[in-house]
Amino acid sequence: MVDVVIIGAGPVGLTCGIEAMRAGLEAVIVEKGALTNSLMGYPLHMEFFSTPELLEVGGHPFTTLRYKPTRSEALEYYRRVALQEELHIRLYERVQGVAGQDGAFEVFTSKGTIACRKVVAATGFFDIPNMLNVPGEALSKVTHYYREPYPYTRQKVAVIGGKNSAAKAALECYRHGAEVTLIHRGAALSDRIKYWIKPDLDNRIKEGSIRVLLRTSVRAIEQQRLLLDGPEGPFALDNDFVLAMTGYRPDYGFLKALGIGTEDDAYKTPIYDKESFETNREGLYLAGTVCGGLKTSRWFIENGRFHAAQIMRHITTGKVAPLRLAERHWKTLE
Ligand SMILES: Cc1cc2nc3c(=O)[nH]c(=O)nc-3n(C[C@H](O)[C@H](O)[C@H](O)COP(=O)(O)OP(=O)(O)OC[C@H]3O[C@@H](n4cnc5c(N)ncnc54)[C@H](O)[C@@H]3O)c2cc1C
């Protein structure tokens, strides 16, 4: 029997593995995809919002050539850390359920069963997109995962959403020759768009390079057009591709299967203790971005990485400590 099974090899799952080892615990990390699988799915040429030292785990220095790390640099950094720390990681193995109780769990995976004393779910939120739930959303021209601008050159692209991902995708596609329309159901684009992205987007809109449709929602997606509802009523827009940048949500089906409940709040926040990170199921912990529920901007790598030490302290000593440092880092991100 191992001490801890950690579900998910994202930045936070890896940090849990490092902290478990440093606390003298035997830990196995089980990941359904590749190492740092979520980062693999990010836009190919993306730049993180955070500076590299805020993404560091286990005290390993993360140095980058420029001010902000790229996706490739982050992939390389976490890969190097995982190998350097000799973490016990099982890749391409999905956790399907957890039976038993605190001190005697059985973790069922797509490849077998692992007996353990404690379980940490660091499963993030990137696997389940928020759907538009409109006819035509399943067409191959629609994606919820923007990768790169090149497929869209000289194409009519609708970017749906009003936050950072939509802003970045719209700008990148425009700069690579796409005819971009940004569609947002709100009266204005989010004021949380990063301060170095917003003026660029505002100016492109002002000069007419990117068209924006506010207070507009999508009613249906067809092969060559979109049916929209705007402030002046329904209308159609010629369209070749749709980038639905409407965000993501934790896998609530999986959390339910683990026996983790949700608070009765607007964000369907999973139930966990705010210092130990133990859930309503004793011996089972949550770590990282999954803790935010639908409020996916609550936890980042920047602050989520601190969950690991809290959890391992609780597992080894039963004690908890306030999360001061993590809270401070969250404020720097706002
Ligand atoms: C485009 C984008 C940019 C971002 N930029 C920043 C930034 O600049 N700074 C910052 O701090 N944060 C940033 N974030 C937010 C956040 O930090 C990341 O989402 C980060 O990946 C979260 O780490 P995590 O370990 O909590 O979850 P994830 O990295 O999502 O890891 C969860 C892992 O669990 C695995 N998993 C899920 N279910 C199972 C299962 N049943 N069995 C086995 N494995 C499973 C997944 O495959 C995944 O690898 C960004 C997010 C996005 C989407």
Image (cartoon, helix red, strand yellow):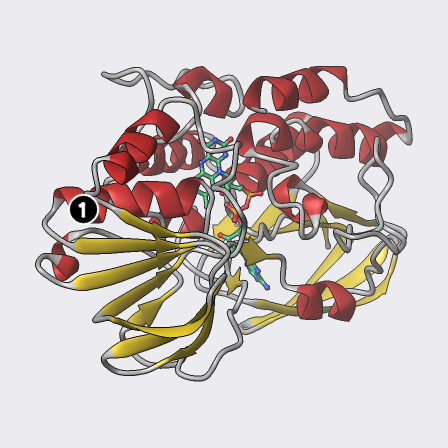
Farthest-out residue, front = 232
Residue at the image position 54 percent from the left and 23 percent from the top: 58
Q: Count numbered badges in the picture.
A: 1
Left or right placement of residue 43 versus residue 114 in this view: left
Q: Position of residue 204 (x, y in %)?
A: 24, 36
Q: Position of residue 82 (x, y in %)?
A: 44, 36
Q: Is residue 26 visible?
A: yes
Depth check: 199 or 94 in front?
A: 199
Against 97, is 195 above or below? Answer: above
Residue at the image position 49 percent from the left and 57 percent from the top: 246
Left or right placement of residue 226 versus residue 176 in this view: right
Q: Is residue 56 visible?
A: no
- Please name the residue that numbered disc 1 is placed on: 174
Q: Position of residue 159 (x, y in %)?
A: 34, 56
Q: Quadrant of residue 237?
A: bottom left
Type of the residue with mark 1: Tyr
Against 313, is 44 above or below? Answer: below
Q: Position of residue 314 (x, y in %)?
A: 84, 32
Q: Quadrant of residue 243?
A: bottom left
Residue at the image position 83 percent from the left and 57 percent from the top: 262
Does the beta carbon at disc 1 come under 8 Å from ligand 1? no
Q: Quadrant of the C terminus?
A: top right
Q: Quadrant of the N terminus?
A: bottom right
Left or right placement of residue 20 versus residue 248 in this view: right
Against 257, is 260 above or below? Answer: above
Residue at the image position 86 percent from the left and 52 percent from the top: 103
Depth check: 232 or 321 in front?
A: 232
Q: Secondary structure at mark 1?
A: helix
* Disc 1 residue crowd, few under 14, some 14–19, many 20+, Cα 10 Å: many
Left or right placement of residue 77 versus residue 255 in this view: left
